[in-house]
Image (cartoon, rainbow, N blue to C red):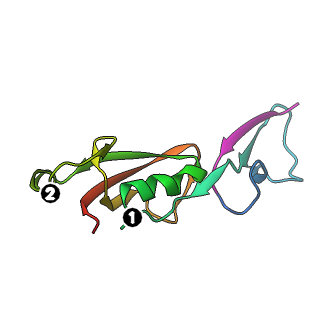
Amino acid sequence: MWRINAEQVYTGRVPVGAIASQSPAAGDRVPAHTTITVTVEPYSVVVPNLIGKTVEQAKRELEPTYLGFDCKSMAASAAASLERGPTIQGTPAGWIVTWQSPEAGTRVGAPGTVTVKVGVRAP
């Protein structure tokens, strides 16, 4: 009789739900009641590049990834200097993404959230 401890880790080496590694290794002899730890590949997606896109474009790009969109802040001076237009989550429509976290190309668990900061209005 053994105990199994399963951990989810993004490796990118095996399909979702598959075991990426185990300890002790397959074939090792271990005493009864040993805990066997397996690393399982969870569902994950690659974060797209949102830099330079309008808020509307960024939200549309995230829809099929199961990642949410969170606009944390914008430069107060830029916000004060521009005329407020229609908003999406309090962000003026047409503003562009100038920063994002996690970075583009990062593999993350989904569902999840991408946090962005926006800057000047797109032309």
Q: Is 2 in front, or is 93?
A: 93
Q: Position of residue 96 (x, y in %)?
A: 31, 61
Residue at the front extreme of this rendering: 86
- In this rendering, position of residue 22 left or right of residue 86: right
Q: CA distance from mark 1 to mark 2?
A: 17 Å
Badge 2: few (under 14), some or many (20 or more) residues near its Cα, within 10 Å? few
Residue range (magenta): 1-10
Q: Residue at x 37, y 55 (%)?
A: 55
- Amino acid type shown at disc 1: Lys
Q: Is 6 in front, or is 97?
A: 97
Q: Is residue 69 above or below residue 122?
A: above
Q: Is residue 51 above or below residue 116?
A: below
Q: Position of residue 79 (x, y in %)?
A: 16, 52
Q: Which residue is mark 1?
A: 53
- In this rendering, position of residue 47 left or right of residue 95: right
Cβ–Cβ under 8 Å for marks 1 and 2: no
Asked if residue 59 is among those painted magenta in the image, a careful observer would answer: no
Which mark identifies residue 78? 2
Q: Residue at x 30, y 54 (%)?
A: 117
Q: Position of residue 8 (x, y in %)?
A: 65, 45
Which mark identifies residue 118? none
